Amino acid sequence: MGVTPNRGYPYPDPSSPMRMTKDLQALAEAVDTDLKAEQDAITQRPMFRAAGGGPRQAYGPGPTADVSYGVIEANNSGAIAGTDVSILPRTTFTPLIAGLWAFTATVEYPQWLGIGWVKLSLYSSSWIASTIATEMPNNVDGNRTISVTGSQAFSGPGGNTVRAVFEANPTGPRAVFPMFSRSLTGFLLART
Amino acid sequence: MPANTPRGISYPLYTDPIANTQVYFQDMATDIDTLVEQFSDRMDAAAMRPSAKASGLANQALAPLTNVTCIWSAEDFDNAAMINLGVNNTFITLTEQGIYIVGASIGLSNTLGTYGVRATLTFSAGIGGGTQTLRGSSTTLDPSPTQTFINPLSMVYCDGITAVNCTVVMRQNAAGAINIQDRNFWASKVSNVTGGF
């Protein structure tokens, strides 16, 4: 009995006794199993989206605050798993598919008296991207949302995490300042 | 004499000698093997969309009213030979046909006064670029942030014939030089994806 070079499909070689029906069945089943595996690999692009959930997040003592998420709104194709989805709220996530990922983080913030600027950053083992807003909301225009988008390479399970970090200029009693809606969206741009 | 299906899978005809059945069987299995392997390779290629990311940390001076092209010192990701820092440390080069999303995140030191800073994604072969312009931070804030950030993002088409060299060009109009600091630059093909991840 021989096997094909790439996929390992069985066939009777000239030295094997020919058992037509069994050999045909073995080939058909091998092809069927292999195509099923290939078909199953066609899935949605790995992505996840975490949101703040119901409670607002207090900024805390600063000077920075890791943004916290209480709800996993989407998690496709094994993007994240384990404690990243079972222990919430949390601030870090490990993308499980090795490759280049893109991320967008958002934070909604109200008027904070005495605050002149806010910054939202994405970090992994190193800095990914940051955005600064230098004009604050007032009593008239209500809350504002700051967002940041960036890209980073990840090695998969056991590798680096991604997190969003909020920062305001160091003035005033920051601990009472709230962050409202928060989101972190990540998706795989390309596999390694 | 065996015949072939339209995709090249051989099969014996009714008139072929039964003594050669094992040969026909092997030929058929090998043909199917080749086709499935091609299918699998295309799925892998779709998952490994041409993508690259470069980064830099060392300060790079940005003099007033001068175009400065960002220099990259590390190749963080490259699955399609799009970065070659030894040959050119300012490019991400697109070669495979398709639409690419291209982005950068640039951190800049601050300086006195109010000024503007601009980051432009430039694409060779006469293809238009993407620009983000930002008002720089001033010292009226309490205290000023230690850095200003700018994040241009754009899309570009590569025809697969002429390579597209992508760069990030900075310009500012402060009273003195500021530094380009932490910086990331990335590109990823987002079209012509046949399936898979």
Image: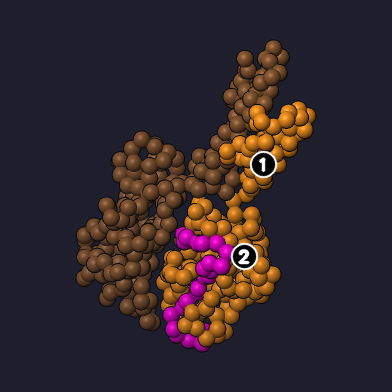
Based on the picture, tell me whether residue A54 belongs to the magenta stretch: no
For disc 2, the marked residue is A50
**Nearer the camera: disc 1 or disc 2:** 1
How much space separates mark 1 and mark 2, taking CA atoms?
A: 35 Å
Query: What residue range appears in magenta?
Result: A151-174
Tint applied to chain A in the drawing = orange
For disc 1, the marked residue is A34
- Position of residue B62 measured from the top left corner of the image (x, y, whole percent): 24, 65
B137 left or right of A162?
left
The residue at 41%/60% (across/down) is B76
Task: Name the residue type under label 2.
Answer: Ala
Tint applied to chain B in the drawing = brown
- Position of residue A185 measured from the top left corner of the image (x, y, whole percent): 57, 61
| Mark 1 Cα shell of 10 Å, populated few (<14), some (14-19), many (≥20) | some
Quadrant location, the N terminus of chain A: top right
Circle 1 SS class: helix
Tell me if I can see residue A143 in this picture.
no
Task: Name the residue type under label 1.
Answer: Asp
Circle 2 SS class: strand
A176 left or right of B156?
right
The residue at 41%/41% (across/down) is B96
Q: Are marks 1 and 2 on the same chain?
A: yes
Based on the picture, tell me whether residue A168 belongs to the magenta stretch: yes
Tell me if I can see residue B68 in this picture.
yes
The residue at 47%/61% (across/down) is A152
A7 left or right of A162?
right
A27 left or right of B133?
right
Q: Nearer the viewer, residue A75 or A116?
A: A75
| Mark 2 Cα shell of 10 Å, populated few (<14), some (14-19), many (≥20) | many
